[in-house]
Amino acid sequence: MAIPETKEAWAAAINRLTIGATTAQGGTRKSTVTVGGAKCVPGLAFDGDLGEPPAVAVEVWDVPADDWPEELAGQYGAALNKPGDWAKKAVEFGADMICLRLMGVHPDGGDRSAEQAAATVKEVLAAVGVPLIVWGCGVAEKDNKVLPSCTSAARGENCLFGTITEKNYRTLVAACLADGHKLIGESPLDINMAKQVNILAQDAGYPLSDLVLYPNSAALGYGYEYVISILERGHLAALNGDQLLRQPVLCNVGAEAWRTKEARAADEEVPGLGTAARRGPLWEALTATGLMPAGADILVMRHPGAIALVKQGIKTFMRAG
Amino acid sequence: MALTGLEIYKKLPKQNCRECGLPTCLAFAMKVAAGQAGLDTCPRLTEEARSNLNEASAPPQRLVTIGEGEAGFPMGQETVLYRHEERFHHPCGIAVRVEDTLDDAGLDARLEAIGQMAFERMGLRMVIDLVAIDNVSGEAARFAACAKKAAEKLNKPLVLISGNVAALQAAAASVAPRRALLQFTEAAPGEDLFKLAKEKNLPLGLQADSLEALTALAEKARAAGLQDLVLSPGAAAGPAAALEFLTKTRRAALQKKFRPLGYPVLTYALGSGDEALIAACWYVLKYAGIVVVDTLEPVAVLALMMTRFNIYTDPQKPVQVEAKLYAVGEPGELSPVLITTNFALSFYSVEGEVEAARVPSYILAVDTEGTSVLTAWAADKFNAETIAAAVEKSGLAEKVKHRKLTLPGHVAVISGGLEEASGWKVDVGPKEAVGLTSYLKQRWKAE
Ligand code: SF4
């Protein structure tokens, strides 16, 4: 009996989007990152064009990460005190991009000023040649004060800025339009809200093709199946032609995985489960591994061991040939 | 695929005799279509109609059970490609491989380790599902002896992996009456293999390096009267090829109702390297019925079990616990009172930390319809009033002498309101459950 054809006839591909600009493109980056482009269920070359493999962005903060467990903080050592050095370490660890999180501008986290934040953006841009994601502190009023200084400090570099939400988008949309940056639209694990944020950005004059979706994240064992289902629904809708869900998707893997007991606990708290040096990176890597088949395009990560493993997995499952 | 009520009705006797317990044949047809009644309850159905209906209404992917009864491991009968479309039904089995080239001491130690591997998570005890004995030696006697030992030592369903029919026969006999899966690894099984599976009523695993070849094998086995089949791309298939195999068989079965591929799939993720673990993770997520692994590293096995647990939860139902007061350890009148929601994940994270800290405590799971702390707070289901009402109802006032509640750090903003609404003092605890151990040991005080 002949086997029936199981390849799907997808109507559309995930948007292809490039972050970073080289000297020739008006920036100073040594490399750029392109994500998206898939016209198939992730990893299935027989189903259609695989597009670009997922990219790994590595987290750098503007202030030392004081709540990172020893196993994680130890990887960066003294570099945690200087964002530029931290970013260099991240590149050594395999970062395709840096994800600079402005934790220190949070009113309760240091309340750093717009000038200080912009200086940190410049410091990181000067330290490394990879493209940059810049992520606000999440407090709308403060981000609206700080992020425009950062977009102009990084003018021409074609960064990815985040995040805009349903409630707070106008300031950052205007700043990114003016300074030529890509944007992350954030939604709380809700596919309609994800579309809504895109509509709002579009109505404010921002092109859908320059947006990245951030539908929020969770770790393996801690509800990541909700994320998987949101990602899968979005990816399938996009392949079926939904313009409002065709954006590449970003997942905050490291931040979620390092909240878990499996990654954080001291060895004596989880007897029989091995050393922290093994548990943490493994949990981070396997969290990322679960999100990739569902459609994650940008994985924001932390631990060098996890980064290496995930890159290996990308090579095995997400690249043609 | 399931037939509609009308399609079933057309084949019924249309006598409205009520012998099935329903008022009309149409009502009966609707029940059958909904899976709430079996065809057997209509005594007047003709044999021909019965077999027609049975064939047409058989699920597109067959349910195959290894072992039997309570101890049996069911797999297959999946209905969707993505969990959001409905849910996945029969969790992928984690099988740990045991090579029959191990010496006796090595064999004992490995079986022992497999039996002892267990984790408590989300109120469940998670263990290794199956043991896969691999006939690496090529010898029938050694293979049979290993299988026998595994059957004696462990009450787990068995997979017998071999390319040698005589070896399979010997091993199957040595573990009888256990219904082991015969996983045949050669491309050209003969009538003797089919005969063995048929006579002993054992599930049979077939493998081939192309779907075309496998389809031909499955058709031969079906023609020989075998129904409980398992399909495999084999241990030599690369990860990308295995993923393609898994996806194509699932799509062919579910979307195209292609019977020869309508069976659960067994994949291998062998070796002790992390590439094997990553591959195993993909297979669990994408359609495997069984994954055979070598690793016995606890954290790796736990990660696979959690991956499996997560992906097989029902997306329609948040996993929740009963909203009530729980006592962990033997709390007394000066023990802490920790507030959380009845979302299973929140509750079990808190419970796990309290147990680890060995500080007996009360945990009050507030009814948030199974949503997490932040989600429930955003939806106004976890606020000063709902928490105060739950405290009142719990009878805590009689159980503890102090008047102090510990609130999750994420909702510190409601602490003032809660103090007012409840009349209790509120202590803002850590944001994540993982911070509770040090909180309970170092920070918490009754007064
Ligand atoms: S027993 Fe059969 S014939 Fe009689 S009413 Fe029920 S379905 Fe109809």
Image: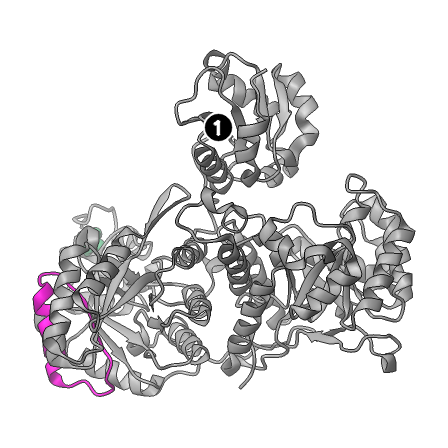
Q: Give residue A75's position: percent from left, percent from top.
A: 63, 59
- Above or below residue B88? Residue A70 is above
Quadrant of image for the N terminus of chain A: bottom left
Q: B46 or B37, which lies in front?
A: B37
Q: Tag 1: residue type?
A: Ile
Q: Look at the numbered disc 1 and say if its residue's Cβ is closer than 8 Å to ligand 1.
A: no
Judge whether residue B189 is colored magenta.
yes
Q: Identify the image's colour scheme: rainbow, by chain, secondary structure or one colour.
A: one colour
- Above or below residue B195? Residue A276 is above
Q: B38 or A309, which lies in front?
A: A309
Magenta stretch in the rendered image: B170-198
- Say which residue appears at 53% left-offset and 20% top-offset: B391
- Say which residue appears at 49% left-offset and 20% top-offset: B335
Judge whether residue A29 is colored magenta.
no
Helix, strand or loop status at disc 1: strand
Residue at which label 1 appears: B363
A112 sits to left or right of A196 = right
- Above or below residue B264? Residue B382 is above
Question: Alpha-carbon neighbours of circle 1 within 10 Å: few (<14), some, or many (≥20)?
Answer: many
Q: Can residue A271 be seen at all in this image of the molecule? A: yes
Q: Give residue B400's position: percent from left, percent from top.
A: 49, 15
- Above or below residue B26? Residue A23 is below
Q: B441 or B243, which lies in front?
A: B441
Q: Give residue B427's position: percent from left, percent from top.
A: 63, 24
- Say which residue appears at 40% left-offset and 78% top-offset: B245
B343 sits to left or right of B38 = right
Q: Can residue A161 be seen at all in this image of the molecule? A: no
Q: B367 or A292, which lies in front?
A: A292
